[in-house]
Amino acid sequence: MPNRTALLVIDVQPDFLPGGQLAVGEGDRILPGVRALMESDSFPVRIATQDWHPPEHASFASNHSGVEPFDVIQLHDHDQVLWPDHCVQGTPGAELHPDLPWGRVDAVIRKGMDPRVDSYSGFRNNWGPGGDRPPTGLAGYLRERQVAEVVICGLARDFCVGWTAEDAVDAGFRTTLVWDLSRSVDPTGDEDLRGKLSEQGVRILTRDELMLER
Ligand code: VGL
Ligand code: ZN
């Protein structure tokens, strides 16, 4: 019977922190707490995700005409927010953030490499030209490592973290989101997001609440 808990550290990369290309407000505030979870022995499996785009990526406003960053277009029949260029493969903004102990993670899942499709979740791409959401292999990796539960932190709460949490529930993992170890691109939507994720079966805790259980 799987009974292990995996820590998932989502997209903690300089481009998502203040000063980065797609800065998330207060993104730097999560660093000490994320470090503490990574250094804890409570998680026998630790995974990082890394947003890792080619320069011609379809999610970049710069690759479309007549649009600006944060406009929404239709891509493969779904809404697509157009982003400033960010996490371009090989650039400093795309590195795993230098202040965290990445030597403690078992695996790094890169995502967003297909230039045609965005990829918020660590588990699956967004919808592609085939109308499906191809898996990254993370669910299979976790199952093979006897993982039953995932604890999720990182950036951004309203995109990659939220999508990863929803897909984790869908894949059958008990799922906890560490609310104060994430931040949103658009914090005005946080109350709705919290309600939506809870309804879908994501357990939302603070870091203090989480550590009291472990
Ligand atoms: C993300 C927008 C675009 C994220 C990645 O990590 O939440 N958001 N690419
Ligand atoms: Zn991205």
Image: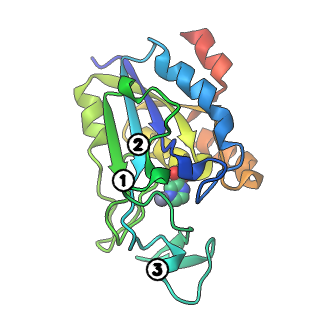
Residue at point 33% right, 43% down?
109
- Do tag 3 and tag 1 residues touch (Cβ < 8 Å)? no
The 10 Å Cα crowd at callout 3, few under 14, some 14 to 19, many 20 or more, is some
Type of the residue with mark 1:
Lys
Q: In the displayed structure, would residue 88 be above or below residue 204?
A: below
Residue at point 67% right, 49% down?
18
Residue at point 53% right, 31% down?
99
Residue named by callout 2: 49
Quadrant of the rendered image containing residue 142: top left
Q: In the displayed structure, would residue 89 be above or below residue 155?
A: below
Left or right for 137, reference 80: left
- Do tag 2 and tag 1 residues touch (Cβ < 8 Å)? yes
Residue named by callout 3: 63
- Helix, strand or loop at mark 1: strand
Residue 107: image location, x then y, percent:
31, 34
- Disc 3 residue lies near ligand 2 with CB under 8 A: no
- Disc 1 residue lies near ligand 2 with CB under 8 A: no
- Disc 2 residue lies near ligand 1 with CB under 8 A: no
Residue named by callout 1: 111
Q: How far apart in space, not on screen, are marks 2 and 3 (Cα)?
A: 24 Å
Q: How far apart in space, not on screen, are marks 3 and 1 (Cα)?
A: 19 Å
Residue 34: image location, x then y, percent:
56, 28
- Helix, strand or loop at mark 3: helix
Residue projecting furthest to the bottom: 66
Q: Which of marks 2 and 1 is nearer the N terminus?
A: 2
Residue 128: image location, x then y, percent:
34, 69
Q: Can residue 201 be seen in this view?
A: no
Type of the residue with mark 3:
Asn
Residue at point 58% right, 89% down?
66
